[in-house]
Image (cartoon, coloured by chain):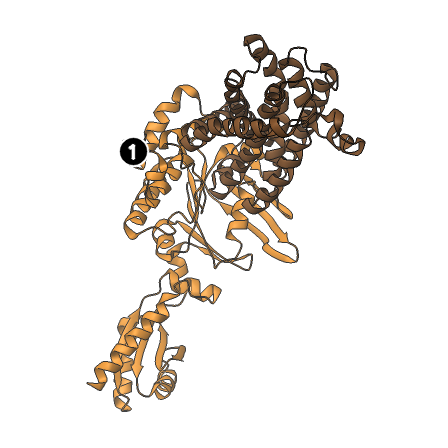
């Protein structure tokens, strides 16, 4: 069996700006494949080309065996898309939206009603079927869009930021639906997201895109363990001496001093930590606090793109430090 | 077969939306009424049209006006669809671009025809001659007028992309097309240069054709009916091709 999506040297330029730069990639049948990357990295451009909305500047790709440049119609029949921005008709009911979709995709008329019933059940909107969409919450609209994307039994489902702007509970719901979908045979899901936890929990493989190229591609666990282990953060009044100490004792090869905190990468925090504290005590360095960090997708993202996917983290750290200071003053 | 289903569903959608919007329905009734009584009465006393009852003279013009303004106004639905994202759902579907344009065009045209037909009962109120035969003869003329006008609106909306830009051009097209179509005054009395401009306006032929079939012989046509219809047909074909082209552009 050939891969469901084969991308060969795909490139797209906008003027002098190269949004997607010579990407080659195979996506296997039945995978949940995650595309991560900072804003403007080229995720949406890549997706648009695979959906045949945008023509590549050079290179090509096949989706379900059909060429995205020459077989528009067949590619479009093979894919379902849930856009980042809403794309429903809010003046119509849920059922009307689904019926229009069935007509546009020529879903066999005799199976149409059963399928609409099925997808509504899947996203738990059966009792809302005849309500107008302008009465739906953001999460419900999203779920309906997912249902609509499934109506013509696509081979590939593209989810562009499926949970953006949703509250944690709705997000949990959507994840549950995606996990349910995964169990269905022969469907491949490709999702882009800004939520690292989402990618980690849902995806079989993840590609990180930056400046139009793939900078990392692997299973989430492999990406995380590829970072070289745990991070130990030590708060001390003498950060520079502690850094030197850790390096001279070969307790870690990667030590940085950030905002007065010593950050050391170790292969196993459980065994390294006692040795670091012992050495510090012998040298009379007072350690105020310790925090441990097992690498997560956020760290992976930061490692490969140099950017923090969570802008709030620094603020959190700042408030934590402020709290420490207050405690010390007492 | 699949294209036909897609066209039909887009067509249905426009009609449903039109009928569901109560303010628009009320407007559909009130606007011609206002034009007919207020404007029509005012013009009757200031403008003299020798040989015709002015209300009867202006009636086919107002049918055209109702259709023109509605057609232009409805073009904006393409921009709404784009703003609210539904256009994307249509554009990524397997339906071809020309079918998308056709479905949209047929839908909006039906709304416009509906708006034009709403004006007819008012003929009795103002004492213009009206019966079933006149109505049935007027329909094909109205359809030819509608297709071209709707296509102008849709082309504009798909090219301009923003509400502001569309609003500006809409006024630029609506008013000259209406005032220079002979809808309000006969073109036989205007200077030659203005006549030239009016003859370049496709709506002139629509108004002329409607008067020919509706004023039952009292109207002296500018052109024979077949020329009017021929010009309208050519206009429709050009606008329809342009529409298919603008909708077909990718990126």
Picture quarter containing residue B47? top right
Q: Residue furthest right?
A: B192
Q: Foreground residue, A300 or A82?
A: A82
Compared to A237, does B159 lie above or below? above
Secondary element at image label 1: helix
Query: Quarter holding the C terminus of chain A?
Result: bottom left
Residue A15 in percent (x, y) is at 66, 55
Q: Is residue A20 left or right of residue A92?
A: right
Find the residue positioned furthest to the front: B45
Chain letter tied to brown: B
* Chain under callout 1: A
Q: Which residue is mark 1?
A: A128
Please indicate, yes or no, whether residue A54 appears anywhere in the rendered image. Answer: no
Provide the letter of the chain coloured orange: A
Residue A276: name its quadrant. Answer: bottom left
> Where does the image place residue A197, in percent across and percent down from the top left?
35, 56
Nearest the eye: A38 or A74: A38
Please give the name of the residue rendered at 68% of the width and 23% of the height, measured from the top-left corner.
Answer: B49
In the image: residue B118, left or right of residue B165? left
């Amino acid at each position: 069996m050939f891969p469901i999506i084969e991308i060969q040297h795909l490139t797209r330029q906008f003027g002098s700006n190269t949004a997607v730069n010579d990407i080659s990639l195979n996506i296997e049948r039945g995978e949940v494949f995650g595309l991560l990357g900072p804003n403007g990295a080229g995720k949406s451009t890549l997706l648009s080309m695979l959906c045949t909305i945008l023509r590549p500047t050079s290179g090509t790709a096949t989706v379900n065996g059909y060429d995205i440049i020459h077989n528009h119609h067949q590619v479009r029949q093979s894919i379902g898309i849930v856009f980042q921005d809403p794309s429903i008709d809010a003046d119509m009911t849920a059922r009307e939206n689904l019926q229009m979709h069935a007509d546009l995709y020529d879903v066999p008329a005799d199976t149409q009603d059963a399928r609409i019933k099925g997808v509504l059940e899947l996203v738990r909107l059966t009792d809302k079927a005849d309500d107008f969409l302008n009465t739906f919450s953001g999460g419900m609209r999203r779920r309906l869009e997912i249902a609509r994307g499934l109506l013509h039994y696509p081979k590939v489902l593209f989810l562009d930021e499926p949970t953006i702007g949703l509250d944690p509970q709705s997000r949990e719901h959507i994840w549950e639906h995606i996990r349910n979908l995964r169990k269905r045979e022969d469907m491949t899901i490709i999702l882009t997201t800004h939520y690292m936890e989402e990618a980690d929990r849902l995806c079989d493989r993840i590609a990180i895109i930056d400046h139009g190229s793939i900078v990392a591609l692997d299973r989430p666990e492999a990406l995380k363990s590829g970072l070289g282990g745990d991070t130990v953060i030590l708060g001390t009044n003498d950060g520079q001496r502690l850094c030197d100490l850790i390096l001279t004792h070969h307790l870690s090869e990667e030590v940085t001093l950030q905002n007065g905190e010593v950050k050391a990468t170790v292969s196993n925090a459980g065994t390294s930590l006692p040795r670091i504290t012992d050495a510090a005590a012998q040298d009379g360095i007072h350690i105020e606090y310790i925090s441990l960090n097992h690498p997560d997708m956020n760290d992976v993202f930061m490692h490969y793109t140099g950017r923090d996917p969570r802008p709030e983290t620094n603020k959190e750290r700042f408030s934590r430090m402020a709290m420490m200071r207050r405690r010390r003053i007492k | 077969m699949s294209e036909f289903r897609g066209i039909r569903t887009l067509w249905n959608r426009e009609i449903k939306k039109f009928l569901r919007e109560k303010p628009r329905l009320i407007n559909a009734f009130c606007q011609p009424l206002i034009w007919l009584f207020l404007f029509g009465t005012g013009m009757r006393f200031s403008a003299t049209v020798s040989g015709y009852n002015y209300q009867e003279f202006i009636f086919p013009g107002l049918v055209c006006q109702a259709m023109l303004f509605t057609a232009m106004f409805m073009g904006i639905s393409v921009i709404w669809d784009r703003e609210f994202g539904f256009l994307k759902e249509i554009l990524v579907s397997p339906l071809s671009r020309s079918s998308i344009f056709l479905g949209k065009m047929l839908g909006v045209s039906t709304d416009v025809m509906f708006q034009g037909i709403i004006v007819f009962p008012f003929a009795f109120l103002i004492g213009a001659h009206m019966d079933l035969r006149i109505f049935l003869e007027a329909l094909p003329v109205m359809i030819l007028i509608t297709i071209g006008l709707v296509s102008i609106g849709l082309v504009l909306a798909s090219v301009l992309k923003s509400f502001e830009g569309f609003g500006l051009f809409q006024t630029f097209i609506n008013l000259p097309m209406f005032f220079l179509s002979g809808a309000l005054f006969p073109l036989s009395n205007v200077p030659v240069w203005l006549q030239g401009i009016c003859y370049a306006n496709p709506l002139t032929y629509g108004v002329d054709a409607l008067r020919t079939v509706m004023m039952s012989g009292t109207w002296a046509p500018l052109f024979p009916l077949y020329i009017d219809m021929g010009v309208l047909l050519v206009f429709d074909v050009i606008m329809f091709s342009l529409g298919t082209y603008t909708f077909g552009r990718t990126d």
